[in-house]
Amino acid sequence: MRNLVGYLINRFGWMLLTLWIVYSVSFVLMRSVPGNPFSSERTVPPAIERQLRARYNLDAPPLQQYFDYAVGIVTRGDLGWSIRLEDYSVNQVLAEGFPVSASLAIFGLVFAITLGIPAGVVSAVYRGSAADLSMMAIAVFGIAVPNFVLASLAILLFVFSVQIFPAAGWGTLSQVMLPALCLGAPVAAYIARLTRAGMLEVLNREHVRTAMAKGLSHRAVILKHVLPGAMLPVVSYLGPATAGVLTGSLVLEKIFAIPGMGSHFINAALQRDYTLAMGMVLTYTLLLFVMNSIVDISYAVIDPRVKLQ
Amino acid sequence: MSPEARKAFLSIAIVCVVAALAWASFFESLPPAEFSLQSGADVKTLDPARATGNIEGRILFELFEGLLRMMPEGEPDPETGLQPMAPKPGMAESFEVSNENKRYTFRLRDGIKWTDGTPVTSYDFAWSWQRVLHPGTASEYSFHLHSIPFAKAYSDATVAVGDRVEVEMWDRPDETPTGKATYQNYPRGTILYGTLQEIRKPPEPSDEEKKKNKNAEADWTESWVYVIDIAELDAQGNVQWDGPTKRQSFSSALKSPVADPDTQRAHMVLVAFDKLGGLETPDEKTFIVNLNDPIPYFPNIVAFYTLFPVNRACVEEHGSPLWTKAENIVTNGPFKLQLRRLRDRLRLEKNQDYYDADNVALNTVDFLSLEGENTALNMYETDQLQWVTMPPETVLEVLKQREDFYAAPQLSVYFYRLNVARPPLDNVLVRRAIAMAIDRVEIVEEVTKLGQLPATTIVPPGLAGYTSAEGFVPDVAKARELLAEAGFPGGRGMPRLTILYNTSEGHRSIAEVIQQQLQNNLNIAIELQNMEWGSFLDKVQQTDYQIARAGWIADYPDPNTFLDMWMTGNPQNNTNWSNKDYDELIRSAARETDPAKRMDLLRQAEQIWVDEMPVIPIYFYTSINVVKPNVKGFFPSAQDLHPLQLLRFDDSVTTND
């Protein structure tokens, strides 16, 4: 338990440091690219542009802006007003987009795990069979094909040929299925391959042979003695997988018209929306850090050999 | 860790996953809307004074209503199918024009209400228009009101000694006498009126200081002290300009080196726009607008969303931009806002208090934020969407054959700006040679393929009463002659030119065709350079380019919107082109009362433009829409306006999928 607390404090310190570095680098980068948030095809008169800049504190010296904005985030959790979506504060944008992205990611991951692990187990147990070959072929396909191609195929198949799912939109369970499937597919493929490799490795271990020799049923051996060991690489992959699912959804968000956070990320950068871009970068940093820490902890729990440091 | 803990962990993990899944499967149910349309990107704002784009416009035309409203008038044009639109009575039931077309008297309808139940009055309009002009609102479209006396000076915040001015004291809510200014302009602080007697300025910072400190100039301007003879108000709120006055001094800086001990802190000193007779509100049903010039398209501007009224109580209570939230916003149009979700939709429902509500057929309308063009078409094909506003270019060939496809010429032009300060483009012969050597027919037939019209002038066809200037005739042989005359026979000695465009497939293909044509026809080497939008705009606005692509959509249906932007010093000019005769013609056209003469002056100006060719016109746009066949009341229009209150479902038409 002491290990855990120490580990968490340690991680928290690193997280703050990382966030600060990310904040500083983004701050400098955003302001050094050409263009500004108020560029538009119609030239804004200087008096009006000054008013606009004042509204976002962009008229202050850069160093002052750097501190003012940081103080706002730390003391009030206030990421400021979005410059391009001017009726919204960055906090509101995140509050609307994050739950959507999160639901999609949860469905995607659940799909990935429920499809990937059984496929990997079956492949390993019946190694060399037709089932193994076909499933691994599908897995290679799933990893290689980018998700927008997969999405187009899925739409052709499930929206137009067999009409079971709506084409796009957000708000009902049936609208989540297709995008979640496309989002989870590459992850499922990876998990299947990792499970299979892990299973094959453990199947040759001595404790498995002992268990078999004891006369335990094949099924019990696989579930009790092989699977837990084979899960280690899968669990360590789940950290980056969650990151991938959360950030990788932006293409799917566009194709399936899903109101998640992903599209804000790109638009904020392209439109020089300094505040929104900063909010997105910091949110993603935080998310990735938290996800990786959770994975590290669970890794330590599953594998007695791993110590939290 | 003990095996028990490990087991417990597994159970906890499973519980977490199940809980997460349950949370994720919970959706707030929203009944589907009767009518859904593709809105495009998220709207920037719902504040009419702050909005600028077409997407914002489409929604604001439904949520709010101005004194006048663009509605169909007359029969569609048999050739193009365009339905003519004209400013029709909206909140105003009628208007009269007097004083040589410079005084508009609007009579407001009876029984018009805001969605909070209060009546819409002439005071709402006077207040809203002044809000558009107020420098703190920073409206990009405030120039629409600049034809009203003192409006331009008010929105530019320029004052001169002798002007009748207003002073806003430093006492807006949430403001302390020594603190920073609040960004909320409304409610305003106490306003005093008076005549400006003197502006005291501390020594101006040197150019070096300005370079070192970007705010030096702004700080300096802020420290000016204004000495004003403050006049009194009578019981009706009229300013007694010639009555007794009291001399006082004001400054927005807390400590100004030129301040007196009794100098008071105040916000900007502006001309007293609301007390100088530009807008008159004799009673709550009458609204009078006086203009500097008899501009004939003023009713069109009145029907434009920047001039729509906003509810004063709502804005002052919630402040900007919070008043635009669905739970706060108060509107007066045929529809009202029920729900707004980013990247998802704006749900509008019929406004039962609208004066013409009986003739509004649709009860709920969804404006879906759909940026993916294929997504929109997929949804249309599966009946989730009734109107696609941006069909994907890749399938246009197929869509064009269908009866639910509407294409029509639009008041909009695609062109290439030339930087006339950069040799060899400073030579008019070179500019005309390039313009003539481009085969526009190839561009519209092989590249854009939407029935766009090749353009050799800047003003699109289809404007009532206007005949465009005589354009040039594309002619390669003539272009070669011109180029030789300019000193580049056969393109020899011609430096390489660069076409700058913002990153987009469409712009690239057009630029490539032009590159090839100029290479083959004139032996001019062209380089292509693409930039992402923000950087592209920066380059254009700093006139740091040779040739740059651009487009312009009419703000109002009048040739002036395409012509006044090329005047010397206009912020949209960006070509370094300047012609005194041209400027003078545009200015005299603005003063001309006779419509025919005015159009003639504008045509003469356009002729100068064509002869000088500071910009190469390429084509006039077409608007494209795909609308379900069972939707009635949809027709193409030159400004791509489609009032939703006219749409209704015709059940006799069945959609065949």
Image: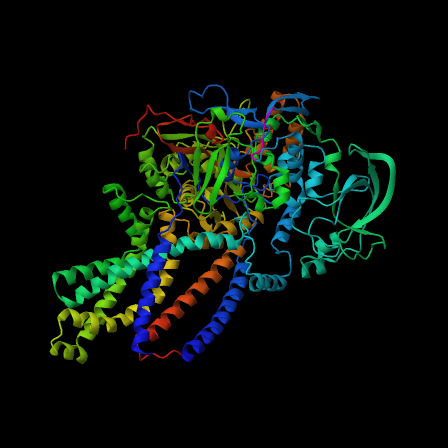
Residue B371 place in picture, x, y as percent: 41, 44
Question: For this view, does B174 lie left or right of residue B240?
Answer: left
- Residue shown at the point (33%, 63%) measured from the top left: B15
Residue range corresponding to the magenta coloring: B110-115
Q: Quadrant of the C terminus of chain A?
A: bottom left
Quarter of the image for residue B274 reads top right
Magenta stretch: includes residue B114: yes
Q: Is residue B303 visible?
A: yes
- Prevailing secondary structure of the magenta residues: loop
- Residue reaching furthest to the right: B244
Left or right? Give the position of B656 relative to A273.
left
**Number of residue marks:** 0
Q: Give the image location of residue A56, x and y in percent.
A: 60, 54
Task: In this rendered view, identify the residue nearer to me: B570 or A225.
Answer: A225
- Residue B225 visible somewhere in the drawing: no
Q: Nearer the viewer, residue B421 or B450?
A: B450
- In the picture provided, is B551 more to the left or to the right than B629? right
Q: Residue A67 location, x and y as percent?
A: 60, 64
On screen, A295 above or below B142?
below
Judging from the image, the colouring scheme is: rainbow
Q: Nearer the viewer, residue A73 or A59?
A: A73
Q: Is residue B561 above or below residue A250?
A: above
Q: Is residue B602 magenta?
A: no
Residue at horizontal 31 percent and vertical 38 percent from the top: B382
Image coordinates of residue B24 in percent, x first then y, are 37, 54
Q: Quadrant of residue B465?
A: top right
B278 in relation to B515, above or below: above
Q: Residue at x 35, y 55 (%)?
A: B22
The residue located at (40%, 52%) in the rendering is A100
